[in-house]
Image (cartoon, grey):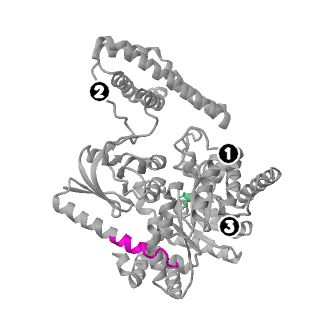
Amino acid sequence: MNTLKGIAAAPGIAMGKILAVDSEELLVPKRTIAENEIPLEVLRFEEALIHTRHQILEIQKRLAQDLGQEHAEIFNAHLLVLEDQSLREEIIHGLKKDHLNVEVVFNEVVRRHLKAFSRTNDEYLRERTADIEDVRKRILRNLLGKTGDQVPQVLKEPVIIVAHDLSPSETAQMHKRHVLAFVTEIGGRTSHTAIMAKSLEIPAVVGLAGAIELLQKGHQVIVDGSKGDVILDPDPETIERYRLEQRRQQEINRQLLQLKHLAAETLDHHHVHLSSNIELPEEVPSVIAHGAAGIGLYRTEFLYMNRSGFPTEEEQYRAYRSVLEQMAPNPVVIRTMDLGGDKFISPMHLPEMNPFMGWRGIRFSLARPDIFRTQLRAILRASVHGKVKMMFPLVSGVEEVQRAKEILAEVRQEMDRESVPMAPIEVGAMMEVPSAAITSDLIAPEVDFFSIGTNDLIQYSLAVDRVNEKIAHLYEPTHPAVLRLIEQVIASAHANKIPVAMCGEMAGEPTMTLLLLGMGIDELSTSPVQLPLVKRVIRAVEYSYAKTVAEQAMKLKSSKEVETFLLASLRQVAPDLVE
Ligand code: PEP
Ligand code: MG
């Protein structure tokens, strides 16, 4: 038995067998072939080459349209690899010599070349290795009939997935595939992969270096997503202990769910609007089950992922309408697509040096008004089916908000002319870029509400990448710089008589509740599972206590001091939650 330590990403305990999927390396099955199968393998290879060529040409076409010819030309090098006659000859020679399936032969040949290239002093050849590696993976995927997803479509039994990395879009499909839990080698607590796991209630541990090597296929493990622990080959006593813990957690959750119909207000009736975040419409039943008074953040970008092409107006309208109808009369804040960062859609997003500082959120929407307008039309059409609000992600200043509002007004006019029924909707801005928080007084008059996205606000203000496990210890929600920015945003909102919400993961941390409540936050939007915990804290205190906690916390000098102080303050009112 061995306990491995990673980063706690999504709570819950799971026990089961490991299935390792390696994003860095595709699993290639080895098979001996007969002499008369060789022409068939050559044919399969030729077909994979043609298929890959079509895919690359398609990517080039779209890139040329969207970003210009010079970006498309990057892929010329990939095409050259496909046309390389000597590669073809080597494969045929290898097939005849080894009598193995073409995937194995191809992989070996290319790997040999890559090795030689990486050792050479010729800089041009060295630089080509990345292109060749990319083409190798594409061809291999085509040979193996893969569509780009590492997690198998059909699992024979429920398993715990171990991967180098998983994309948010891959995680979004897991609940349909009976995945018990997952462990990744890289990633941080507020990566969208972790957020998605929490939403789907899949226990997860991220940032566990060397996980693939340490956790081999078939091993029995326990994943404790609340602590970030992975226990390898547990003994019977440990299994029993975790079974008991699982039951204890289920009992606590059952008790917390009894708060469902109770108001989110302090002992002296100060009310906070408690809502939930969703990524997919399928999450709405869980939102309702946990007693949320609305949806404070609907991350619509997931509609654009796991598919080819963009969702149509009609498709989006149906998704928004279904969420609104299920939640009515409670409000639903639809955030316009926040594509980019760790939620990219290839081939729209070329690899960027700094994707989180790149073509993301409202920047992408303003650069692609055609895609943006389709979404705005769908939201406006859905507005008659419930109480919808709209907000823009990643704004960095007032001009972006003004421009987005102009486009919205144009779309509304256009739809008015078409006599499409629409309801008036409130428009808000996310406060997640420090420049927006600092100029929140200038932005507030332009909008009906603010929503603080702490996941990004923390990464940008502290310069700590939210998905990088190496610096996860520096990702500190209680850093005085973060608290001051939050204070500033709340002050700007209230000076302009607009409400301010928080929808980052910080909003769902019970340790932060007293602080945020005392700072005057009007709404907290959390993942559904966290919501009852936050409600518990709110209901346990007088508003004046929370205000004193906030005042004291703002005077402290370091994250550690604030954290210790907040834990002690919470212990006073809800000792069981500190356990
Ligand atoms: C945030 O940044 O806090 C936020 C809620 O948005 P996302 O996590 O989707 O970036
Ligand atoms: Mg964000």
Q: Earlier in the sequence, mark 2 or mark 3?
A: 2
Rounded to the nearest whole Å, what is the CA distance between mark 1 and mark 2? 44 Å
Answer yes or no: disc 1 within 8 Å of ligand 1. Answer: no
Image coordinates for residue 424, horizontal then vertical, percent: 74, 63
Q: Are marks 2 and 3 in contact (CB under 8 Å)?
A: no
Give the residue type at disc 1: Ile
Q: Which residue is mark 1?
A: 371
Q: Earlier in the sequence, mark 1 or mark 2?
A: 2
Q: Please tell me whether mark 1 sits on a helix, a strand or a loop.
A: helix
Image coordinates for residue 279, horizontal then vertical, percent: 53, 55
**Dividing the picture into quarters, in which one does residue 349 lie?**
top right
Q: Which residue is mark 2?
A: 30
Residue 439: give its label: 3
In what quadrant of the picture does the N terminus appear? bottom left
Q: Can see residue 90? A: no
Give the residue type at disc 3: Thr
